[in-house]
Amino acid sequence: MRYAGRSGTGFTQKTQHTLHAQLEKLIQSKAPFVDMPKGVSRGVNWVKPELVAQVSFSNWTRDNLVRQAAFKGLREDKPAKEVVRENAESLESTIASTKHPEKSAPKSTPDRSNHIVGKSANKNASASKSNLPLTHPDKVLDPESGMTKLMLANYYLAVADRMLPHIADRPLSIVRCPEGIGKPCFFQKHIGMGLPSGISSVPVPDKKSGAIEQYVTLNSADGLVGLAQMGVLEIHPWGSKNDSLEKPDRIIFDLDPDESIDWKTLAATAMEFRARLEELDLKSFLKTTGGKGLHVVVPIRAENEWPVVKEFAHKFVLGIEKKNPGLYLTKMTKALRKNRIYLDYLRNDRGSTAVAPYSTRARPGAAVALPLDWKELNAKTRPVFQVADFGSWKKRLASDPWAEMSNVKQRLSAKTIRDA
């Protein structure tokens, strides 16, 4: 280890709090460096060199120290042993390497974290502990079930074929829990520094200012493994794709019951939604949310803009509520939800999201949001699926309740909206 200077900027109060908790676990009495300038060790708490920080700086000083360094964040995708000082290459050698890669090998492995990654030719290949790009694969992310980072990555690989059609090439919002469930988690939608391979960005104009923001997106199993490496325990896609951001291709109704509502009542509500949608010639699909609720999902052609789709969803749930106002509620007011089912139509708004099918939830037990066959509403109790017991239910992957979704080409016409 060679001392390279210090960074005094780039830290927020939240960053400092998080770093302090991580560094406290790594405290050691001895400095890890082979050599240091005088006075550097005064008032310093040394730690084991296990974490990797990304730091931007203007240049190197004569003493081989970084100048004007700013902290950008921790790199969870890079083991500390891989970090070396990079050597600058001339423009001529870089061009030569690009034109004739067999003649000029790069001096170090390039960082692909911010590259746009296309569809992998072998995107759904399975991988083992030895070849998955994970640091601390045995880290427990869910103390209740014992789910580790490796278990999460292998689970994402196993369900990639089923999951990717519903999240690939869409803006994503993710919930990251680097230290696991029960520890601080945070919501992220914008691209950050040092993201693993397979995760890229899509430019999204802010709906108020028009300023371009780079959102997280992916389209391969590599990207799913990258999410596991980042400690991502929830994946929430937009209802529209990257190439058609303003026109959603699905409508989502979130049936969110009060704790007092039993499974039979909730199941009957989902069936009522299905029947009413069929009256409008709309085919719908069902999934658990990984919590206590259900999602009813309606695929549509991407030809109506968000306000139109939201208007239809609102009008539809108002009609359901009107028939049984004692059971159903369409307003967000929590004080009114006792003994009721909240019919959430607000997932159908630009920038709003819903948990992806097959995504885990950042709650004790790490339950999974899973597509259901409509017949499964006849079960006596609410179905629960967890990553930790994946072995007992992975046979479900042999048949897909949502297999027909990609072939459904139904339209949200003016008549349908009027009849809702």
Image (tube, grey):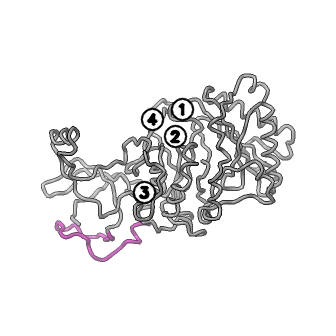
Q: Earlier in the sequence, mark 3 or mark 1?
A: 3
Q: Secondary structure at mark 3?
A: helix
Q: Main SS of the magenta segment? A: loop
CA–CA distance in space, label 3 to label 2: 25 Å
Check if mark 4's residue and mark 1's residue have beta carbons within 8 Å: no
- Residue at position x 75%, y 58% in the image: 382
Mark 4 vs 3, N-terminal side:
3
- Residue 71 in the magenta stretch? The answer is no
Contact, mark 3 vs mark 1 (Cβ under 8 Å)? no
The reply to whether discs 2 and 1 touch (Cβ–Cβ < 8 Å) is yes
Left or right of residue 207: residue 283:
right
Kindly identify which residue carries mark 4. Answer: 203
Q: Which residues are magenta?
A: 19-48
Identify the mark nearer the N-term, 2 or 4. Answer: 2
Q: Is residue 196 left or right of residue 332?
A: left
Q: Is residue 64 visible?
A: yes
Of residue 285 and residue 37, the one placed in the foreground of this image is 285
Residue 171's tag is: 2
